[in-house]
Image: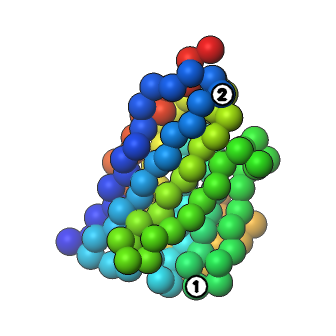
Amino acid sequence: EVQLVESGGGLVQAGGSLRLSCSASGFTFDDYAIAWFRQVPGKEREGVSCFSRSDGSTYYADSVKGRFTISSDNAKNTVYLQMNSLKPEDTAVYSCAADYGPCDSDYERLEYDYWGQGTQVTVSS
């Protein structure tokens, strides 16, 4: 069964850190773009970051650049999103998604093959 599962969300004060995990089963990340998205009620889903294991490319939304870092653990078939210096506006449901092929600057508009269920991140002020 193809599945993506996110974990690591929670409640944190502004300025704090969280690390989200996206673990895959039923396929490997080797040839896929793995992206993190976030969404709050009443707003469109926003691309946060994308990582391609094949070429090591990474992309970040301007709003998180310098604060968030995407990485992977090949042995665990897991992609992480390290979130530092969190702000209240980072509050959202964070989901990971996979699309065959590498990331590029249009990663936010790709039609992703697989999605996780999402994990809630709440940043208090």
Q: Which residue is mark 1?
A: 54
Q: Is residue 22 above or below residue 91?
A: below
The residue located at (62%, 14%) in the rendering is 125
The residue located at (42%, 31%) in the rendering is 10
Residue 32 image point, x, y percent: 50, 77
Q: What type is the residue that disc 1 sits on?
A: Ser
Residue 46 image point, x, y percent: 62, 45
Q: What type is the residue that disc 2 sits on?
A: Gly
> Can the viewer see residue 111?
no
| Crowding at mark 1 (Cα within 10 Å: few <14, some 14-19, many 20+) | some
Is disc 1 placed on a helix, strand or loop? loop
Is disc 2 placed on a helix, strand or loop? loop
**Res. 120 image quadrant:** top left
Q: Is residue 25 left or right of residue 52?
A: left
| Crowding at mark 2 (Cα within 10 Å: few <14, some 14-19, many 20+) | some
**Marks 2 & 1, CB-CB < 8 Å contact:** no
Q: Which residue is mark 2?
A: 15
- Is 88 in front, or is 104? 88
The residue located at (42%, 38%) in the rendering is 9
Q: CA distance from mark 2 to mark 1?
A: 33 Å
Residue 119 image point, x, y percent: 40, 40
For this orientation, the residue located farthest to the left is: 1
The first of marks 2 and 1 along the sequence is: 2
> Can the viewer see residue 14?
yes
